[in-house]
Amino acid sequence: MLRPALLLPLALAACSAAPGADFPKLAPTETLLLEEPLSPSPAPGLEARAEALRARAAALRTATP
């Protein structure tokens, strides 16, 4: 049975990253929480497709008794 004094070092060793692992760069929370619109839109074609699907759904709803 492992002694309780050995559990903490073993747990910390299990959580450590492999040598040479690259960690993502940290950014301030204030920067991440800004809700600025994306410019230019990353997918302008998706907006047209979504509108076409909404029109199709509306047409199917009116056609169904």
Image: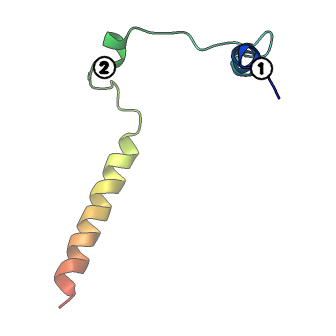
Residue at the disc numbered 1: 3
Residue at the spot 50% in from the left edge and 9% down from the top edge:
26
Residue at the spot 35% in from the left edge and 32% down from the top edge:
41
Residue at the spot 55% in from the left edge and 9% down from the top edge:
25
Horizontal relation, residue 28 to residue 57: left or right: right
Name the residue type under label 2. Answer: Leu
Whichever of labels 2 and 1 marks the residue nearer the N terminus, that label is: 1
Residue lying at the far bottom of the rendered structure: 65
- Pick the quarter of the image with the N terminus: top right
Q: Is residue 45 above or below residue 53?
A: above
- Colour logic: rainbow
Q: Residues within 10 Å of mark 1 (few under 14, many from 20)?
A: few
Residue 59's spot in the image, x, y percent? 22, 76
Residue at the disc numbered 2: 33
Judged from the image, the secondary structure of the residue bearing numbered disc 1 is: loop
Instruction: Tell me the CA gap for discs 2 and 1.
Output: 44 Å
- The image quadrant of residue 20 is top right
Judged from the image, the secondary structure of the residue bearing numbered disc 2 is: loop
Q: Nearer the viewer, residue 12 or 2?
A: 2
Name the residue type under label 1. Answer: Arg
Q: Nearer the viewer, residue 61 or 47?
A: 61
- The image quadrant of residue 7 is top right
Residue 5's spot in the image, x, y percent? 72, 13
